[in-house]
Amino acid sequence: MKALVKSRAERGLWLEDVPTPQPGINDVLIRVLITGICGTDLHIYDWDEWARATIPVPLIVGHEFVGKVVSVGANVSDFHSGEIVSGEGHVVCGRCRNCLAGRRHLCAHTLGVGVNRAGAFAEYIVLPMSNVWRHSQHVDLETAAIFDPLGNAVHTALSFPVLGEDVLITGAGPIGIMAAAVSRHAGARYVVITDVKPNRLALARQMGVTLAVNPNEKKLAAIQKQLGMHEGFDVGLEMSGSATAFREMLANMSHGAKIAMLGIPAGEMAIDWRQVIFNMLTIKGIYGREMYETWYKMTVMLESGLDIKPVITDRFAWHEYQKAFEVMASGDAGKVLLDWREAGAAGATPAARS
Ligand code: NAD
Ligand code: ZN
């Protein structure tokens, strides 16, 4: 089968012919249809310090996908060929204290699809049945392809009650923008999002935020005044990984406010802890999605009117992956998709022929 492989310990990804994976007795074999490119994939492409320390070479990369079940192992009775599914990208151990207690998202030994084990940028992927999510018929294929990052947005945005609250989101990347849509859907009063990139702010406006703000142009204190707010934001969703953004957030929260942190800073980050203490803030770290409460919430919110389709800005065929990664790297796009439906259809790949 065709697959995008990190086959060398250097910058780049390579389209290769690799053996089609065989499902074990507890596994599901899935034909991949559409995949999403994540910031993580970009780190792997660039072969930065994190990637060099983390990724075993060779490895099929990618973890955001939707596909169709092809076959199942002998122990699998819950999935059937033809069903439309996605995969939870964290494969948990099932044996640690948290797993045994049913808190699988808190597993101490989680393995990442496309990070520690074979990924989804390929014609086929094999996953344990416990990592497969069957989609509702009401969810379209492209939205299904980005359930993984939508799950990050939903997990973060629903970490604290937002009904009637004023929500500040720092970072209008794809996840921040989806979190804004989720916060609105969940009943927030104001949803203010910040970013330093005009294209991203424009995309956020298209998704229906109260205000999309460049903090270099307008201070959040002035935004609070403009909206008639008196005591600061009630809920903060940090989705930029920027220390500057986080400090601005801390300075604009109400007493007793809650902050959920998804953005991954490049290193250690200093803050004025007195703001946290005297303002009695709660800060919660977020990693991945809750299995499978987040997946359930995504589905029912989409069924009840949540629309995140505008966040998908670019679509490429599987063999146009270089172009797709360039668009991703520009940092101006929303979600970038790769379509694998034609892969393997006519023998040699267009990329290999040229
Ligand atoms: P992204 O990089 O596309 O978006 C981050 C945005 O933050 C960019 O648009 C950038 O311009 C903006 N930004 C930079 N400095 C800023 C500042 N001072 N103020 C406001 N905005 C600023 O990333 P994404 O894919 O949307 O993901 C969001 C974050 O979540 C990233 O840090 C990513 O690494 C992280 N992430 C975490 C998890 C997890 O499980 N914890 C999962 C996926 C992604
Ligand atoms: Zn575990």
Image (cartoon, rainbow, N blue to C red):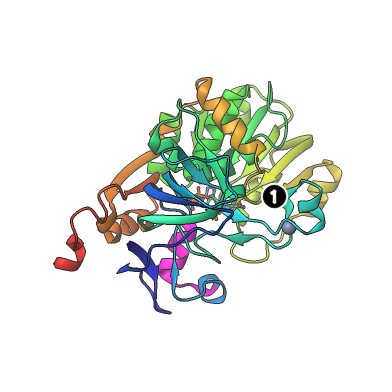
| Amino acid of disc 1 | His
The C terminus is located in which quarter? bottom left
Q: Position of residue 40 (x, y in %)?
A: 49, 59
Q: Which residues are magenta?
A: 39-49
Identify the residue shown where x is 63% and y is 30%: 224
Q: Position of residue 324 (x, y in %)?
A: 31, 55
Front position in the image: 278 or 74? 74
| Figure check: 92 above or below 302 | below
| Figure check: 19 above or below 71 | below
Magenta span: helix, strand or loop, mainly?
Answer: helix
Identify the residue shown where x is 40% and y is 44%: 334
The answer to whether residue 312 is visible is: yes
Q: Position of residue 123 (x, y in %)?
A: 35, 55
The N terminus is located in which quarter? bottom left
Q: Residue furthest front?
A: 74
Q: Secondary structure at mark 1?
A: helix
Residue 347 lies in the magenta-colored region:
no
Q: Residue furthest left?
A: 354
Q: Residue furthest bottom?
A: 9
Identify the residue shown where x is 55% and y is 71%: 50
Identify the residue shown where x is 54% and y is 33%: 180
The answer to whether residue 172 is visible is: no
Front position in the image: 76 or 173? 76
Q: Position of residue 315 (x, y in %)?
A: 30, 45
Local crowd at mark 1 within 10 Å, few (<14), some, or many (≥20)?
Answer: some
Q: Which residue is disc 1 drawn over? A: 105
Front position in the image: 74 or 195? 74
Residue 44 lies in the magenta-colored region:
yes
Position of residue 112 in the picture relative to residue 268 (left or right)? left
